């Protein structure tokens, strides 16, 4: 496998991991770091870029999905949305620092879109969170060497 293929695989893995689809980008990143064949900087860059881009897609989905709240097939009940809105109003945009957390982060990025967090603020907070997570994963992988 050449470097370009590895970076593309990592980008796709990271992108899918940040959407509502399942994925394990940390495992992919760790594997590529342990192979010691690729630039660690570029691995962290492509993992972060894919994951951030996926979160931006979630934000757009969240902003779009609110048009369907009154439809019978809408997956959330009004009471659930009310509870989420109370929680989100309490913690707001700062909860996006948890966007890297498995099972929690993806819904947070969708909710941020639903509540129309300004995109520049969203991207800034999510980017900081996700880049720091991949730096940490990279650091741990290096310690395994």
Image: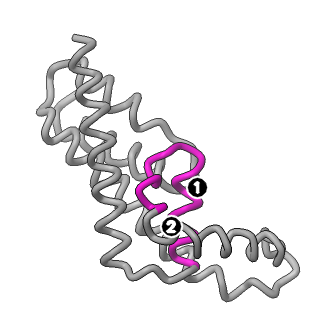
At mark 2, the secondary structure is: helix
**Hey, which quadrant is residue 52 in on the image?**
bottom left
Left or right for 98, reference 33: right
Left or right for 7, reference 126: left
**Quarter holding the C terminus?**
top left
Left or right for 38, reference 115: left
Q: Secondary structure of the magenta portion, mostly?
A: helix
At mark 1, the secondary structure is: loop
Left or right for 27, reference 134: right
Give how far across and how far down residue 129 sits, in percent.
34, 52
Give the residue at x 32% y 26%: 30
Residue count near mark 2 (Cα–Cα under 10 Å), binned few <14, some 14–19, many ≥20: many
Give how far across and how far down residue 81 sits, in percent.
74, 74
Return the residue nearer the eye: 16 or 133: 133
Query: Tag on residue 58?
Result: 2
User: What residue is disc 1 on?
Assistant: 20
**Hey, which quadrant is residue 122 in on the image?**
bottom left
Whether residue 104 is in magenta: the answer is yes
Q: Are marks 2 and 1 in contact (CB under 8 Å)?
A: yes
Give the residue at x 58% y 51%: 104
Give how far across and how far down residue 79 sits, in percent.
83, 74
What are the residue bounds of the magenta stretch? 95-114
């Amino acid at each position: 496998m050449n470097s370009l293929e590895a970076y593309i695989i990592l980008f796709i893995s990271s992108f899918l991991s940040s959407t509502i689809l399942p994925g394990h980008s940390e495992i992919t990143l760790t594997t590529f770091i342990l192979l010691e064949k690729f630039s660690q900087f570029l691995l962290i860059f492509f993992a972060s870029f894919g994951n951030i881009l996926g979160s931006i897609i979630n934000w757009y989905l969240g902003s779009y999905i609110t048009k369907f709240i009154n439809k019978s097939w809408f997956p959330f009940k009004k009471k659930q949305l009310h509870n989420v809105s109370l929680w989100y109003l309490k913690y707001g945009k700062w909860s996006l620092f948890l966007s890297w957390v498995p099972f929690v982060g993806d819904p947070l990025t969708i909710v941020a879109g639903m509540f129309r967090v300004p995109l520049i603020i969203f991207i800034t907070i999510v980017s900081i969170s996700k880049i720091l997570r991949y730096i940490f994963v990279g650091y741990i992988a290096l310690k395994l060497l």
